[in-house]
Amino acid sequence: MSLTKRYVLKLFFSLKYITANVVDRNNGRIVSSASSVEAALKHGFECNRTCNAKAAAVVGEVLAMRIKVEGVPQIHCNVKKELDKGLKNHTKIWALITALRNGGIKIVDDSVL
C-alpha cells in the first residue's frame, strides 16, 4: 500500500446527521472523527438542523482542528465519488471540504489524478 494515500476522508450523510471520518488505511483505524450527532455540536445548530450545509461546515471546522491535533499531514478524498453518492448532498460536501481547507488541512483530490 502506498504511504502517499495513507489518510482518507470518508463522509456519511443520513437524513438527520453528518459524520466525517479520517481513516488510516495502513491499519484500518479511524484517526479523527466529527459528527453532528455530538452533543457539543448538536446544541449549537439553529433550530436543531443537524444535516444542512451550515452543519456540514461546522463538522468540517471541528474535524480540521482534530486532524491538526493528530498531526496528519494531508488527507485524500475522491470528491467525484462522494458527489456521486447523492444528489442532495452536493452543497453539504462542498461546505465540509471548504471548511477543512479553510482550517489549514491539505486535501488531495483523487478524482483529478
Image: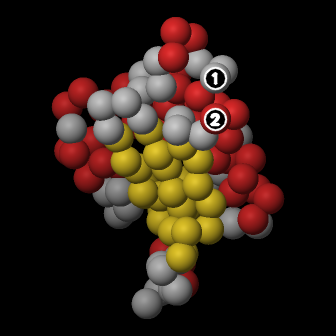
For mark 1, does the 10 Å Cα neighbourhood hold few (<14), some (14 to 19), or many (20 or more) residues? some
Residue at 72% across / 53% down in the picture? 66
Residue 8: image x %, image y %? 48, 65
Q: Left or right of 27: which side holds 15?
A: left
**Contact? badges 1 and 2 (CB < 8 Å):** yes
- Position of residue 68 relative to residue 87, above or below, is below
Give the farthest residue toward the right. 69
- The disc labelled 1 sits on which kind of residue? His
Q: How is the image coloured?
A: secondary structure
- Position of residue 108 relative to residue 71, above or below, is above
The quarter of the rendered structure image containing the N terminus is bottom left
Residue 47: image x %, image y %? 52, 9
Give the farthest residue toward the bottom. 1
Is 64 or 79 nearer to us in this picture? 64
Q: CA distance from mark 1 to mark 2?
A: 6 Å
For mark 2, does the 10 Å Cα neighbourhood hold few (<14), some (14 to 19), or many (20 or more) residues? few
Residue at 59% across / 28% down in the picture? 42
How many badges with numbers are in the image?
Answer: 2
Quadrant for residue 112, please give it: bottom left
- Position of residue 72 relative to residue 66, above or below, is below
Secondary structure beneath label 1: loop
The quarter of the rendered structure image containing the C terminus is bottom left
Q: Left or right of 75: which side holds 19?
A: left
Dot label at residue 39? 2
Is 13 or 25 nearer to us in this picture? 13
Is 70 or 39 nearer to us in this picture? 39
Res 100 seen here? no
Q: Which residue is mark 1?
A: 43
Q: Left or right of 62: which side holds 50?
A: left
Secondary structure beneath label 2: helix
- The disc labelled 2 sits on which kind of residue? Ala
Quadrant for residue 43, please give it: top right
